[in-house]
Image (spheres, rainbow, N blue to C red):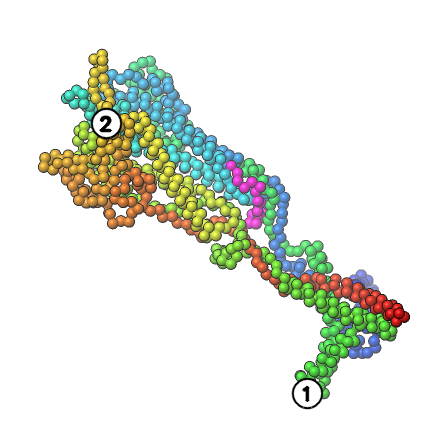
Amino acid sequence: MNSVVLVVLYKSLSCFVFYFLVGTCTCKRAFECCRKFKQYCQNLNLFPSAPLTTDEHELKNQIISTRLYIFLFTLSLTILLLYTSLADITKTITVATPTLTKYEQLYSKYSQTLTCPCKHISINYEKFLSIEYTFHQICASVFITDEWITHNDVILHYLDASNDPRIVVSYAFQALGAFCELIESTINNSLIQFNSTQYITASVASSDLFQSQAQSFVDQFKLSTTNNFLLSLNMIRKTTQGNAFLSGQLTNYQLMVLDDKQTVLTISTAYSGCSCHLSSTCVNQLSIYKNDFGNITLFDVPGFYTGCYVIEALLQSTLQCFYDQACINELILYLSSISPINATALDPSLSSQYSEDSTIENLLNSLMIEEWNPTKIYDRYYDECQPIECTYTIKTRNSVIYIITTMFGIVGGLITVLKLVVPRVVKFIRKKRSRLSPSNIGVSLATYIRNLFPILKSYFLTLNLFPSVPASTDEHELKNQKISTRLYVLLLILSITILLLYTSLADITKTINVPAPALTKYEQLYSKYSQTLTCPCQHISINYEKFLSIEYTFHQVCTSFFITDEWISYLMMSNEATSANINFQWTASNVFQALRGFCELVESTINNSLIQFNSSQYITASVASSELFKSQAQSFIDQFISSTINTFVLSLNTIRNSTHGDGLVSGLLTNYVITLGTSVSNEAIVFTVPAGYSKCGCAQSSTCIAQSSILSSQANMGTFYVPGFYTGCYVIEALLQSTLQCFYDQACINELILYLSSISPINATALNSSLSSQYSEDSTIENLLNSLMIEEWNPTKIYDRYYDECQPIECTYTIKTRNSIIYIITTIFGIIGGLITVLRCVVPQVVKFVRRKKELTQPLIGKS
């Protein structure tokens, strides 16, 4: 049948081609060719009967069937050809193990759909990132060398020369050198941790994205390293001032010997009207005086200060003088009691992010780093990633090979179906139309249907799909053909029925793909197909800050009147120089300074931890369900809170233990009493005696305490013991064991102020006991610090933001279903051609063989 169609097309085209080739000189032949082609088409009969019939009606049926067959066949092929050739399809292209150059070419063209899965999805930063840095030139200068420091470290002639420039310069530059060393150690330790941190990418990150993320990693490293260093430094500074440690250079407290020539007390030093008992940051200009009484100034060292503590004064100082060679020379001239030293000024012409009058604290706030020099090597990252392959999609049309194979796959079944259906439909319609003659119009539908069944019965009884050519008159042969026809039809119907039932009723596992689903769509899918739903994330690692935020509420004392300068100054004014170290006035200002310091330190610790927490990454290859996400997010938050508390408490305990271990003396003389005595050689000596509280000695334990009290100056008032408040070996140790019980009670506060009435009273409102709190009024400060003085953590877990950051490429899920109508039809069409061909070949031969076998056995049975 295919050959017939091809012949028809060939003849038609031949005529027209021939016409155009021969031109006007053969015009008659061209018209003749067309006339013959027209006549051929009019008489074309693809369904001749065997034997050939002369019945006009039958011949008409055959010609109409032929034309309808060719029309339907051509139309079907045209539709199929247009659909397969013009339909836009999404084609996935795979490039195996692409080089970096090839990847960049692909990315420049197909960045929207390009995906290159990494062989190694986690890569240490050190593989592609390196961070170099340049210190401020002071850290490589002569001013932090032993030569400069020892040159100024001379024996003093006067014990009270606390602002002697030789002391200040010597210890200040020792501290400055120590800062340089500590910062370098801090950075190197942070770099070890940074280098081992892993960059996680399921697919190759583009160069732009890589550079952006790598810079973000570097910025985070610098920020966290700086914050960690400053937090440790500030914790030491706050606890030092809180405990009022006595400086060995007597820069914050001066010793005073009482009339008994044995008892030594301390008096807070003041700088420019600022008392070291009230603040550790009091400073004076560092000056060189003509005499030891400090009333004739020879030289003011520009930008350099002396104060309560060497480090506190250093932090407020600048290096202004040390950029000026003339200033240095003059300073050396006044300092030197021995041969002068050659010291070259810092180079002001060097490029620097700092000015000459930047304070040391400003330098420390940037870790004294002039320049960070990170190197981000994309080539190394790509080599470590080792993409297995790259895939991208393009909009295209089916290839010629696909079109040809598709048409060949369907054309066989199409021809067979049309060949079977068309002639019979034509015959049925024309027979029906002939019966609907004017004489039969009045016949009822019921009568027509009753007459139709006998006709159909007769048709099927006489149906012969295997006629011989020429037509046979042999009864046996005709019988074979009819049996073959009936068996053929039966097997064909049975096969098609089985195939139809199987393809339509068989359960199949079908994978459904939903490209880039919105959150609402995902939730709908998850509610129905949670067991099989998988939605791979485009970004498998997401910073916590993208979907998590943590707010917190401090204990009300951290925003109360009791940690303000006004209250602390008020307590300072009530301080009396007395050896009664359990006296409330003696330690109160330091206690509340320490409490304020704790509030500030806790806030700094939390904020620093939050920076690191926010940059931590949540890693999920596929979208996590809302329930799983919330559970994991809560786990992250709980871990953050726990680790932040542990870090703070560990740091504080380290300082507490080292303080007691080193036997540091409090300037308030709360842990050791300084006494004058004589040695066996009758020389005057100074020695310390450990203080004791409630039969507990400060030499053995730093936690010894006693109830804090106020002895009124009025005889009729007696002593007031402050409820829940203690004094002890160290201010901080006593504070940790104290409670805020009195400060929740307005009557207690009023009585406290009454006993401090040697000065004008102050308005102080009690803490609000009606506020909801996780702490009781008699909770110790240590209990508060063990929870970072936080009343409530208020985390926010935003699933929508997580989902948006994840950006699922697609969602896939499987369902149990049945084949679609299209699949069933195409399957039957794909098989029916071969099935009909096999049955047409096999059935007649089987029938002929069986009947012949049967005929051979019957005579034998008759003879026996």
Reading the image, the residue beneath label 2 is 691
Residue type at tag 1 = Gly
Which of 381/791 is in front? Answer: 791
- Residue at (82% x, 70% y) in the render: 480
Q: Position of residue 223 (x, y in %)?
A: 41, 37
Looking at the image, is 290 positioned above or below residue 815?
Answer: above
CA distance separating discs 2 and 1? 133 Å
Looking at the image, is 156 positioned above or below residue 453?
Answer: above
Dominant SS of magenta comes to loop
Q: Position of residue 555 (x, y in %)?
A: 29, 44
Image quarter where the N terminus lies is bottom right
Q: Which residues are magenta?
A: 109-124
Secondary element type, mark 1: loop
Q: Position of residue 680 (x, y in %)?
A: 22, 13
- Residue at (73% x, 76% y) in the render: 428
Reading the image, the residue beneath label 1 is 442
